[in-house]
Amino acid sequence: MKLQHHLGGLENLGPVNLDTRVFAQPWEQRIFGIHTAMMAESAHLESALPGYAIKTLPTTFRSDWTWASLRTGAEGMQPFEYFKFRYYEKWLGGISQFFIDAGYLTAQELAEKTALYRSQPDSPLPHRPNTPLDAQIDAYLQQGDSPRHPSRQAARFKAGQRVRVADPEAVDHTRLPGYLRNKTGTVDLAYPDSYAYFVSTGVDGIGEPMPVYRIAFAAADIWGAGKSEANTMIYADLFEAYVAAVA
């Protein structure tokens, strides 16, 4: 997470939006549904827990689509463009570009369909019943998929140990909040087993499954005493690649 993608580290962004609605507009539900359907038929589920029959699923979608795919698309946006669009508009842009880049449709086909529904908003949407795929989506909504793996290596750090967060080379997509780089905290919990991420982040350090820790930071050590409430702690789950021993 970087720049505009982790607002805990940015100041002067204006008033906080207190709208608690999950979907502010009906069309947002459809975007969420498209994303969910893509997740439920993603090729990565073949090797993910709890196990899904992907190879025999009647679908022409044969790509990986995960939360990492969605985040990577959003993080590629120019920051001012990012703040200009609504939450699900960002989703729509990332999903649309993915389908074009992956060859499922062309930019011209998308433009033609967009023009059609703008001029004729009541035109019927495509309807192709697919009972096995519907069942797969229902199963995925109930069970999801887990990045958890049996432990492949012993955790380097234990609860109560002081650690320092690393400062790896900046990459296109990271799981390290920028405001925690080089900060010192205390291991609160070493989670059992190992955890992977949906994609490799390269030199950032996330690849094969590894231990994950819950680390506690004093808020004053992050924001400074003048900008922190007394006795406030910040907790963050971090991959071991981001954690180093205090010299």
Image (cartoon, helix red, strand yellow):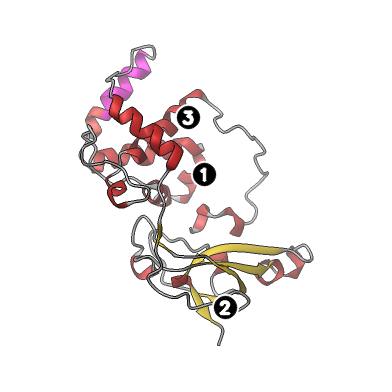
- The tag on residue 163 is 2
Q: Position of residue 229 (x, y in %)?
A: 77, 62
Q: Marks 1 and 2, Cα distance to the nearest angstrom?
A: 34 Å
Above or below, 195 against 143 in this view is below
Sequence-earlier tag: 3 or 1: 3
Above or below, 92 against 123 in this view is below
In the picture provided, is 182 more to the left or to the right than 76?
right
Mark 3 crowd level (few <14, some 14–19, many ≥20, 10 Å Cα): some
Q: Check disc 3 and give the amino acid type.
A: Glu
At x 28% / y 20%, what residue is drawn? 129
Q: Is residue 119 magenta?
A: yes
On-image quarter of the C terminus: bottom right
At x 47% / y 45%, what residue is drawn? 82
Sequence-earlier tag: 1 or 2: 1
Q: Check disc 1 and give the amino acid type.
A: Phe
What residue range appears in magenta? 110-120
Q: Marks 2 and 3, Cα distance to the nearest angstrom?
A: 42 Å
Nearest the eye: 62 or 169: 62
Mark 1 crowd level (few <14, some 14–19, many ≥20, 10 Å Cα): few
Q: Are marks 3 and 1 in contact (CB under 8 Å)?
A: no
Q: Position of residue 13 (x, y in %)?
A: 62, 50
Classify mark 2: helix, strand or loop. Answer: strand
Nearest the eye: 95 or 216: 216
Q: Which residue is mark 1?
A: 83
